[in-house]
Image (cartoon, grey):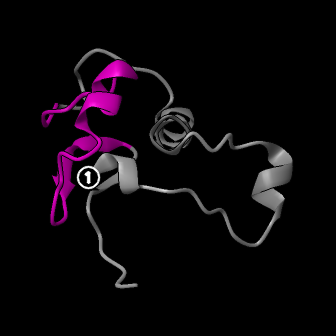
Amino acid sequence: MKAEDYARFEPDYPGSRSGSDEDRLLAHMIELGMPTEDVDDDDEDWGDPIHTAFALPERATGVRLTPSALDNPTLIGSTRHLT
């Protein structure tokens, strides 16, 4: 299996995405209230970017991120439904 960065961004700046399919998670990002365009630091607060960044893969993969799950060495979830 080939590893590939489909969508990559910094949690504080979700509007600045990159990757081979940078908008693959866009619908989930919008549902979570993440700014999907570049914004200035003075723009309206959209919440805690770290909490939202953890909510995004949970929503996209259906894998619930619990404290005990984060203690395990590997988190795996299918992304086949995103293609």
Can you give x and y, in whole percent of width and height, for residue 32 in the image?
40, 23
- The residue at 68%/40% (across/down) is 64
Picture quadrant where residue 79 is located: bottom left
Pick the residue in front: 19 or 38: 19
Can you say whether 31 is above or below 10 in the image?
Answer: above
Q: Amino acid at mark 1?
A: Thr
Which of the pair 82/20 is nearer the observer? 82
Q: Secondary structure at mark 1?
A: loop
The residue drawn where x is 51% and y is 29% is 48
**Residue 65 left/right relative to 15:** right
Q: In which quadrant of the rendered view does residue 20 lie?
A: bottom left
Vertical order, 39 against 54 (above or below): above
Relative to 66, is 10 on the left or the right? Answer: left
The number of numbered badges drawn on the structure is: 1
Left or right of residue 48: residue 45? left
Expressed as whole percent of the image width and height from the top left, the position of residue 70 reads 76, 56
Looking at the rendering, the stretch of residues picked out in magenta corresponds to: 12-39
Crowd band around label 1 with a 10 angstrom C-alpha radius: few (<14), some (14–19), many (20+): few
79 left or right, relative to 69: left
Point 32% across, 48% down: residue? 82
* Quadrant (top left/top right/bottom left/bottom right) for the N terminus: bottom left
Q: Residue 8 lies in magenta, yes or no?
A: no
Pointer 1: what residue?
Answer: 83
Q: Is residue 33 magenta?
A: yes
| Location of residue 43 in the rendering, given as x and y in whole percent from the top left corner | 22, 20
